[in-house]
Image (cartoon, helix red, strand yellow):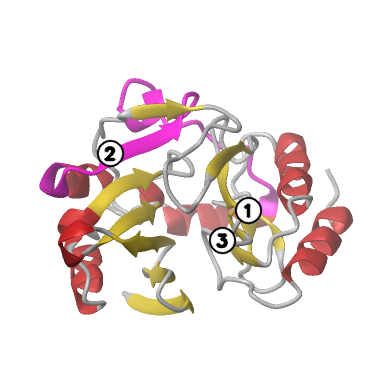
């Protein structure tokens, strides 16, 4: 796992062989620690690495208050249950993906384009995620309790309950897998409904963030709003 600083003393990316998560720090709290939020949680084998990354930053893992899951795929939710049980964090996810995360419904099958088929097979090498309790089901616009006003942005298409996480006061947007930056900025792959995913891409781009963090690929921190707007406009349904 690689630990990459995105915003000093605020935001780090935790990059795994497939996929990534993000650690957000809020201001100083009582007892000398900082309130921590994890956006996505890697695969089932990632818990120890995530804890180690938190400690390496001089932070306390017991300050992990919440884990916000952008969608129900195994490379994003795998370690959430273990981390929540270990440190008392609450798990948040959209209402439509929460039953999948809890293991009550199967993971929805994507409608693959021909060129996505071998990539999808590679992604299935990630271990399956265990059923994970969801403490709070969110809807579009719901406050998430961190980041001076972070809220959920329903962005369906990759899955029915995919969300972006928007921190307007900090100009930060987490897109989940709706948008990818592996090579050129593009619509994410493996969508259950490509047309809805394109609409969601445009919805997220319209937020005009200064920093965009993706489920796959390096964060965008320069000319971000313009790049997102162009890529979204150029994406065909």
Q: Residue at x 64, y 38 (%)?
A: 155
Task: Give the label on residue 168, or none.
Answer: 1
Pick whichever, 6 or 28, lies toward us.
Answer: 28
Q: Secondary structure at mark 2?
A: strand
Q: Pointers 1 and 2 in contact (CB under 8 A)? A: no
Q: Position of residue 95 (x, y in %)?
A: 47, 24
Which label is found at residue 28? none
- Point out the image quarter for the N terminus: bottom left
Q: Is residue 78 visible?
A: no
Q: Which residue is mark 2?
A: 90
Q: Nearer the viewer, residue 193 or 83?
A: 83
Locate residue 26 relative to residue 118 in the image: left or right: left
Number of the label disc, if any, that sits on residue 214: 3
Does the stretch in magenta take in 112?
Answer: yes
Look at the image and give the residue range highlighted in magenta.
85-114
Vertical order, 108 against 15 (above or below): above
Mark 1 or 2, closer to the camera = 1
Q: Can see residue 182? A: yes
Residue drawn at the location 31% of the way across and 30% of the way down: 134
In the displayed structure, 187 sits above or below 55; it is: above
**Secondary structure of the residue carrying numbered label 1:** loop
- Which tag, 2 or 3, sits closer to the chain's start? 2
Closer to us: 126 or 32: 32
Q: For label 2, count other residues whose C-alpha is less than 10 Å away and answer few (under 14), some (14-19) or many (20+).
A: many
Tag 3, which secondary structure?
A: loop
Q: Nearer the viewer, mark 3 or mark 1?
A: 1
Residues at marks 1 and 2, CA–CA distance in whole angstroms: 22 Å
């Amino acid at each position: 796992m690689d630990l990459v600083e995105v915003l000093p003393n605020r935001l780090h990316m935790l990059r795994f062989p497939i996929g990534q998560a993000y650690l957000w720090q809020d201001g100083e709290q009582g007892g000398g620690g900082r309130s921590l939020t994890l956006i996505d949680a890697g695969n089932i084998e990632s818990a120890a690495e995530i804890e180690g990354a938190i400690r390496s930053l001089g932070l306390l893992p017991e300050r992990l208050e919440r884990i916000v899951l952008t969608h129900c795929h195994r490379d994003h939710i795998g370690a959430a249950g273990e981390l929540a049980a270990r440190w008392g964090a609450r798990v948040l996810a959209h209402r439509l993906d929460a039953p999948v995360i809890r293991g009550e419904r199967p993971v929805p099958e994507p409608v693959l384009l021909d060129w996505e088929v071998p990539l999808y097979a590679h992604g299935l090498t990630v271990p399956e995620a265990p059923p994970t309790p969801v403490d709070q089901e969110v809807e579009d616009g719901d406050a998430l309790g961190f980041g001076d006003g972070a809220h959920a942005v329903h962005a369906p298409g990759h899955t029915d309950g995919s969300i972006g996480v928007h921190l307007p006061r900090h100009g930060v947007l987490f897109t989940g897998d709706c948008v990818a930056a592996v090579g050129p900025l593009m619509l994410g792959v493996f969508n259950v409904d490509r047309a809805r995913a394109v609409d969601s891409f445009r919805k997220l781009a319209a937020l005009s963030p200064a920093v965009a963090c993706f489920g796959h690929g390096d964060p965008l921190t320069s000319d971000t709003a313009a790049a997102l707007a162009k890529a979204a406009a150029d994406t065909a349904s």
